[in-house]
Image (cartoon, rainbow, N blue to C red):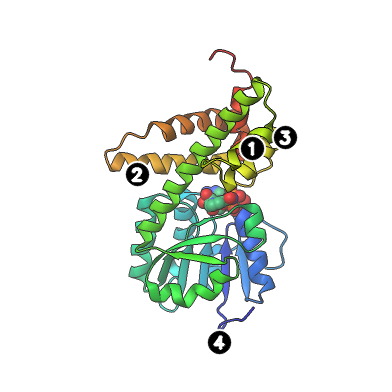
Amino acid sequence: MTLPTKTPSLAVYGLGIIGSRVADLLSAASYPLGTWSRSSRSRPDFDDDAAALADRSEVILFFLKDAPAVRETFEAIRPTLRSGKSLINHATIDLETTLFLESECRAAGCGFLNAPFTGSKVAAGNGKLVYYCGGDSSVLEDLRPILDVSSPQIIPMDSASQATVVKLTTNLISACTVQALAESLRISRAHGVPAETLLDAIQGNACGSALAAMKVPTMEAEDYDPHFSLSNMLKDSRYAIDLAEKAGLNTPAIRCVSKEMDTLNRKGLGEQDFSILNSQFKSDNSH
Ligand SMILES: NC(=O)c1ccc[n+]([C@@H]2O[C@H](COP(=O)([O-])OP(=O)(O)OC[C@H]3O[C@@H](n4cnc5c(N)ncnc54)[C@H](OP(=O)(O)O)[C@@H]3O)[C@@H](O)[C@H]2O)c1
C-alpha cells in the first residue's frame, strides 16, 4: 500500500459492522488513526471524546447509522471543523441531512465528500466496498488514497445529493429483491422444489444476481447473522419513500416492504440481517 506523501491523521466515527472493519483496514495501512463510537470499545485507538478526536484529526470519516446519529455527532465535532480538514460521510442518510452537512462544512471552510457505499460485512473486511462519491472533485482526488484502502472501485457522482439519491434508490432495489426472493423461496418449497434447484434456476435467469446468490442459501438455512441490519434497511426504505413523495411519486413496492420490515422491527428483530424478511410467512396461513 502506497501512502500519500503527507499521511493525514484519520478519525473513524461509528464502529458498527462496517466502520469497525474499515478502521482495521486503515490502521493496517499505517494511517495515524483514532476511533469513536457512541458505546465504548476496547480498541487501543479508541477515544471517548468525539470533539477532542476530531480536533486532532485531519480527515473525519462517518460510518454512523442514520440521519439523527450523523446530526448529533456532527454537532459534537462542529466547533473543530476548519480549513485544512475534511469530512467524509459514508452513512446512508436522507437528502436534507446530506445538504446540511455539505453547507455546514462549506461554511466552516472544511472539505466535504459524500461517499455512501455498497458492499456488506464481508466486502468491508476484504476492502471491497464500492463508493458512490459526490462532492468537490479536488476533495475526492485528495482523499482517494484513503478510500482506496477499503475499495477497489470509486464511482464519481455529479454532486453530494446525487450520491445519496443513488444509494437510496439502489437499496430500494435490494429491499424489494430480497422480499421477492423470500416469497419465491417460500412458494417453491411449499410445492416441493428444493432451494438449490430454485437458486440454479434464478442464476440462469435474467433475474439472477449477487444478492440472490448471497441471500437464498442463508434464508434457506434461516441464518440471519447481520451483514446489513433490518433496522438499517428499514430507515433506508423510509428515506427512499420520502424521496419518492418529494417527486410526487407513489411507490407501492417499497411501501409494502417497508411495512413488513417495520412489523419485524417492532418484534425486536431490527438487529438481525434484513433477509429476516424471509421469516414473515412462518405463521401467516391466511393468504
Ligand atoms: N452493513 C452494510 O451492509 C451496509 C451497506 C451499505 C451501507 N451501509 C450504511 O453504512 C452505515 C453503517 O452501517 P453499519 O452496518 O456499520 O451499521 P451498524 O452496525 O448499525 O452501526 C451503526 C453505528 O452507528 C452508531 N450509532 C447508532 N445510533 C447512534 C447515535 N444516535 N449517535 C451516535 N452513534 C450512533 C452505532 O454506535 P454504537 O455501536 O457504538 O452504539 C454504530 O457504531 C449505515 O448508514 C448503513 O445504512 C451499511
Please report whichever mark, 4 or 2, sits nearer to the chain's N-terminal start. Answer: 4
Please report whichever mark, 3 or 2, sits nearer to the chain's N-terminal start. Answer: 3
Check disc 4 and give the amino acid type: Thr
In the image, which is nearer the foreground, mark 4 or mark 1? Answer: 1
Please report whichever mark, 4 or 1, sits nearer to the chain's N-terminal start. Answer: 4
Check disc 3 and give the amino acid type: Ala
Q: Position of residue 269 (x, y in %)?
A: 62, 33
Q: Gap in Å between the C-alphas at discs 4 and 1?
A: 48 Å
Label 2 packing within 10 angstroms: few (<14), some (14-19), many (20+): some
Q: Gap in Å between the C-alphas at discs 1 and 3?
A: 13 Å
Quick check: 96 above or below 178?
below
In the foreground, 54 or 150: 150
| Residue to which mark 2 is pinned | 243
Mark number, residue 5? 4
Instruction: Work out which residue is located at the far front of the displayed protein and give it.
Output: 204
| Residue to which mark 3 is pinned | 221
Instruction: Work out which residue is located at the far top of the displayed protein and give it.
Output: 286
In the image, which is nearer the foreground, mark 1 or mark 2? Answer: 1
Please report whichever mark, 1 or 2, sits nearer to the chain's N-terminal start. Answer: 1
Rendering quarter of residue 279: top right
Respond yes or no on whether mark 3 lies under 8 Å from ligand 1. Answer: no
Check disc 1 and give the amino acid type: Leu
